[in-house]
Image (spheres, grey):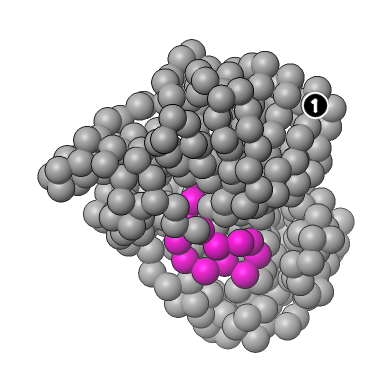
Amino acid sequence: MRTDESGLYCEPGGFHIDPQRVVERAIVTHGHGDHARPNNRKVLATEATLDIMRLRLGVAAGDTLQPLAYGETLRIGEVDVCLVPAGHVLGSAQVVLEYGGSRIVVSGDYKRRRDPTCAGFEVVTCDVFITEATFALPVFRHPPDTEEIDKLLASLDLFPERAHLVGVYGLGKCQRVIALLREAGYDRPIYLHGALQTLCEFYEAQGVALGPLRYATARDGKEMAGEIVLAPPSALKEVWSRRMPNPRTAMASGWMRVRQRARQRLVELPLIISDHADWDELTQTLTEVEAGEIWVTHGREEALVHWAAQRGLKARALSLAGFEDEAE
């Protein structure tokens, strides 16, 4: 395994993992746009990820799309490839590579806490673990999801005359927030910006129950008083949001731990709900996979490399460019 101008490359298998440029053969860990790039020739991923890529990219999803179920093994070149759940979003996978008696696991993006909308992260012991590091600083310790949902519901009780406009990313975060609200007993219709409709319908078609949903874009804003309205973060400042009665703006993101980020986005109600592992979950994972060598692909790399080196592990930062925080 090495890096080149397209990202992570497995030489004996002849494929890239989450390439940042167009390549001949790609394994894609999940459907977020910074990992699932368009126009690769041959693409391998879970069936759900391929479906999401078709929804988002159309024919640009790839010339040849090959599904691989969790736990199945496929020989590519000289490498045995297996996908296991990453717990990030629906269809997300870690890539397990077996070659020459050694095992490398590429995590992709992942989280460790329970998510009612996708399969949970599975620990796979390995020789080399290649991890993300989006929230790899000790300051990032995400509170329980239930506490953040309770904050939103308490605000609804306190301000029943105000629409609660919640910024959520379209793939994963949106559906997770809805599912957490349902688990908390909230059974009223939840209103959606039109940009969130397609993926919510896809999740429901995959068996993820989201309860009653309404589409807010074309409705009279006065109907939203006392309601929860979900929208992409980019839509929070759009003209349509101004039709709502004195909206209280919230944002569901791990970055809401940083007060300056919340102030910059004019967020009144920061909700620390992340689809990435926090500091404790990252270090827990490095301990549990028992790898002697750690590679860090993107994010706050230095702190995680330092943590690993202090414990006698070989660690290096790959500093791969092009990965963003779409799921946060």
Judging depth in this view, the residue of 315 and 153 nearest the camera is: 315
Q: Which residue is mark 1?
A: 64
Identity, as a three-letter code, of the amino acid under mark 1: Thr
Q: Relative to residue 241, is residue 228 depicted above or below? A: below
Residue at (20%, 41%) from the top-left corner? Answer: 313
Judging depth in this view, the residue of 60 and 26 nearest the camera is: 26
Residue at (57%, 66%) from the top-left corner? Answer: 115
Q: Residue furthest top?
A: 5
Q: Can you give x and y, in whole percent of width and height, for residue 49 in the image?
A: 70, 44
Q: Relative to residue 188, is residue 197 depicted above or below? A: above
| Part of the protein shown in magenta | 108-121
Answer whether residue 144 is visible to the viewer in this image.
yes
Q: Can you give x and y, in whole percent of width and height, for residue 94 in the image?
A: 53, 45
* Magenta-colored segment: predominant secondary structure: loop
Answer whether residue 254 is visible to the viewer in this image.
no
Q: Relative to residue 322, is residue 117 depicted above or below? A: below
